[in-house]
Image (tube, grey):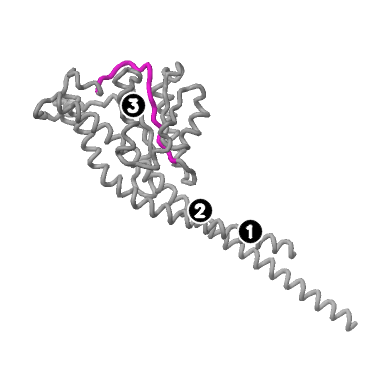
Amino acid sequence: MSGKLKEVRERISSVNSTRQITNAMKMVSAAKLRKAQQAITDMRPYANKLQEILSNILSNLEGDASSAFGVERPVNRAAVVVITSNRGLCGAFNTNVVKAAVKIVEEKLADVIKAKEVTFYFVGKKGYDAMKKRYKGHKMVNDYINLFSDLSFDNVSPLSQELMNGFISGDYDAVYACYGSFKNAAVQYPQAVQFLPVENIETEDATNGSEKAFKADYIFEPSKEQILEQLIPNILQTSFHKFLLDTNASEHGARMTAMDKATENAGELLKDLKITYNKARQEAITKEILEIVGGAAALEG
C-alpha cells in the first residue's frame, strides 16, 4: 500500500509542477497578447482601407503600364508564403494555417505543384517543418523564418519586396499568403489569400441590381504615374505587414487559450489524484488498525 501511496504522491507533484508551468505560460502569453492585439487593432482598418483603394485604383487603370501588379496571366509559376509561429503549445493554430496552405496548393495550384514550379516562403519554423515533409523536392525559402523576432515595417518589407519583384519580373505568376487572422483571444481563423496579382473591384451591375462594389473615380495630382510608382508598392507592403501582425496576435491568443485549458485540466486531474491519495491513505490506516486489533485479540486469547 505504501508503494501505491508513493506513486500517487509523485503523480500529484508532477501534475502540480506542470500546472504551475502552464499557468506561467498563460500569463506570459496574455502579456504578449495585449501588445500584439493593440498592434493589429490599430493596423487593420488602415491596411484594409488601403487595400480597398489599391483594388479600386487598379480597376480604373485600364491597361496603364503602372498597373503591373494587377495584371492576371496564366499561372505557370507561383509563390506561397506560409506564416506560422516558431513555437508550439498553441493548440491547432499552426496545423490550421498549414491546412489552409495545402488546400490552396492542391486546389488552385494543382498543375503548378505537379510541375514543381511552386516556391514556398516561410515565416515561422512550424510551417517550414510541416511543408518540407509534405512537398519534398520543391524550392523552400527559409531566409525569413525568424521575422517574428522583429515585426517592424522596415524588417518585414524586404520579404514583400522580394515577392513583388518576383511577380513583376515574371518569376511568379501568382503569390498567395497563408496566415492566421486574429478575431479575439479565443478565435483565430486560418486564411489563404491572393497577394498578387491584386484582385480588381467589380463594377456595379445596374441591370440585375447585384450588390458589388462601386469603382471610385480618383483625381491624381501631380500625375497618376508619379503617384502610383510610390503608392502601389507601399500599399502592398502595408497589407503584407498586416498578415504578420495578424499571425503574431493569433499565436499569442491561441497559446493563452491552450495554456488556460491545460491549467484547468491539470487542476481537475489534481483534484482526482488527491481523492485517490486520500482513499489509499485511509485504506492503509484502516488496515493498520485492524492488524493492531487482531494482534491484541490474539494476545488476550
Query: Callout 1: helix, strand or loop?
Result: helix
In the drawing, does residue 265 fall left or right of residue 52? right
Residue hosting label 2: 262
Which quadrant would residue 97 be assigned to in this image? top left
Q: Is residue 213 magenta?
A: no
Q: How many marks?
A: 3
| Circle nearer the N terminus (2, 1) | 1
Residue 187 percent location from the top left of the image: 38, 46
Q: Which residues are magenta?
A: 70-85
Distance Cα–Cα, label 2 vs label 1: 16 Å
- Identify the residue at the far bottom of this view: 300
Residue occupying the point 49% across, 25% down:
135
Residue 233 percent location from the top left of the image: 24, 29
In the drawing, does residue 229 fall left or right of residue 138? left
| Circle nearer the N terminus (1, 3) | 1
Residue occupying the point 21% across, 33% down:
52
Residue hosting label 3: 163
Foreground label between 2 and 3 = 3
Residue hosting label 1: 11
Mark 3: which amino acid?
Leu
Mark 2: which amino acid?
Ala
Quadrant in the picture for the C terminus: bottom right
Query: Callout 2: helix, strand or loop?
Result: helix
Label 2 Cα neighbours within 10 Å, binned few <14 / some 14-19 / many ≥20: some
Between residue 165 and residue 296, name the one nearer to us.
Answer: 165
Distance Cα–Cα, label 1 vs label 3: 52 Å
Answer whether residue 211 is visible to the viewer in this image. Answer: no
Q: Are marks 1 and 3 in contact (CB under 8 Å)?
A: no
Residue 150 percent location from the top left of the image: 36, 42
Residue 282 percent location from the top left of the image: 69, 70
